[in-house]
Image: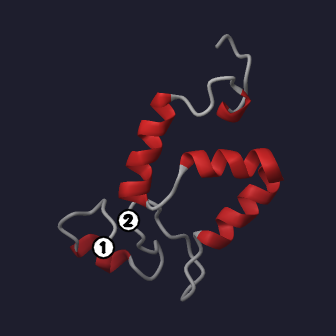
Amino acid sequence: MNNEVEFCYECHDFACERLKRIDCRYRTYFHMSPIDNLEYIEKNGMLAFLEAQQSKWQCPRCGEAICCHNGICFGCGLEKLRSKKKKYRWED
């Protein structure tokens, strides 16, 4: 792209097939969407996105960060994380 865009949504191919495949994987495994995130940034700006993400990924019990890869809190859920056999998957 020769540094023509800073964010994918600025590209004339948004959302390209590669990004759609990544988005499908992230929706399936991590309960998040890069495409939705990019659309939110485009509409509301980076600061609003970061504030929303901080709220979204903050543990309601202890206030620490929740891992987007498995939904476990880095504060009060570390023992659960250590004991999981499949460490990088959300529970069903």
Indicate the quadrant containing the N terminus: top left, top right, bottom left or bottom right: top right
| Nearer to us in this view, 57 or 13 | 13
| Nearer to us in this view, 86 or 81 | 86
> In front: mark 2 or mark 1?
1
State the mark number for residue 48: none
Specify whether 50 is left or right of 59: right
Mark 2: which amino acid? Asn
Can residue 78 be seen by looking at this rendering? yes
Residue wearing tag 2: 70
Indicate the quadrant containing the C terminus: top left, top right, bottom left or bottom right: bottom left
The part of the image, by quadrant, that contains residue 28 is bottom left
Q: CA distance from mark 2 to mark 1?
A: 7 Å
Q: Residue furthest top?
A: 2
| Nearer to us in this view, 8 or 72 | 8
Residue shown at 67% from the left, 72% from the top? 55
Question: Residue 82: horizontal and vertical position, in percent?
Answer: 27, 71
Q: Residues within 10 Å of mark 1 (few under 14, many from 20)?
A: few
Q: Residue furthest left?
A: 85
Residue shown at 55% from the left, 79% from the top? 59
Q: Are marks 2 and 1 in contact (CB under 8 Å)?
A: yes
Q: Residues within 10 Å of mark 2 (few under 14, many from 20)?
A: some
Question: Residue 6: horizontal and vertical position, in percent?
Answer: 72, 28
Circle 2 SS class? loop
Mark 1: which amino acid? Glu
Residue shown at 55% from the left, 70% from the top? 65
The part of the image, by quadrant, that contains residue 70 is bottom left
Up the image or down, 79 lies above or below 47; here it is below
Residue shown at 69% from the left, 35% from the top? 9
Residue wearing tag 1: 91
Up the image or down, 19 lies above or below 86; here it is above
Mark 2 vs 1, N-terminal side: 2
Question: Residue 57: horizontal and vertical position, in percent?
Answer: 57, 69
